[in-house]
Image (spheres, rainbow, N blue to C red):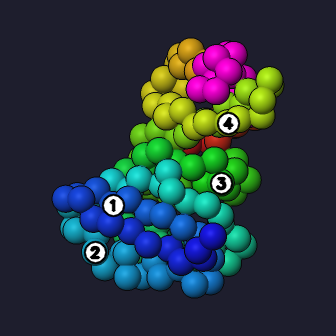
Amino acid sequence: MSSALTWTKQGERFVVVGRIDENADLNALAQEIPAKGATIDLAGLTRINSIGVREWMDFVSSLDPRPLRLERCAPVFVEQLNAIANFAGGAELVSVLSAYECEADGDSINVDVKIADARANRMPHPPRCPRCGVEMIPAQENDLYYRFLRYK
């Protein structure tokens, strides 16, 4: 597993992959965000350590007043949203990835859930396991996983 944080720019959208830690150069990413703002796809995040938390919060703070939208936030990002007040700063949360697991064979997949749907308690129908066809279950109870919605 690579520890580097990388991103690709697709118009006004950035796809971020890797770890947010002491090696992540979020200042370089901030310099690429245009004045009119951007959307950041966080599905590829694999880890955020304590230094990465500080770096991320400094990053979102440095972008103010540029509008920032966060989509497909990986479960490791959602963990931080639930643990740290204002982790997303002024960014708009568009969607998160919710992990589902198969009780029969242990496979897991992530499902993109729109924040507006989660707020309205319109959760997606549980997916079926691609290997065995059994209906999968959420890896974490919705009340716990979406706790950050109480504060954002």
Front disc: 4 or 1: 4
Q: Which residue is mark 3?
A: 76
Q: Residue at x 57, y 84 (%)?
A: 23
Is the stretch drawn in magenta largely helix, strand or loop? loop
**Taking 56 as reference, is 78 left or right?**
right
Front disc: 3 or 2: 3
Depicted 114 relative to depicted 6: above or below: above
Front disc: 4 or 2: 4
Marks 1 & 2, CB-CB < 8 Å contact: yes
Residue 32, which numbered label?
2
* Coordinates of residue 83 in the picture (x, y in percent): 73, 53
* Coordinates of residue 72 in the picture (x, y in percent): 47, 44
Depicted 83 relative to depicted 99: above or below: below
Between the C-alphas of marks 4 and 2, the distance is: 34 Å
Marks 3 & 1, CB-CB < 8 Å contact: no
Q: Which residue is mark 1?
A: 14
Mark 4: give few (<14), some (14-19) or many (20+) Cα within 10 Å. Answer: some
Q: Residue at x 55, y 26 (%)?
A: 118
Q: Secondary structure at mark 1?
A: strand
Q: Secondary structure at mark 4?
A: strand
Which contiguous range is marked in magenta?
128-143
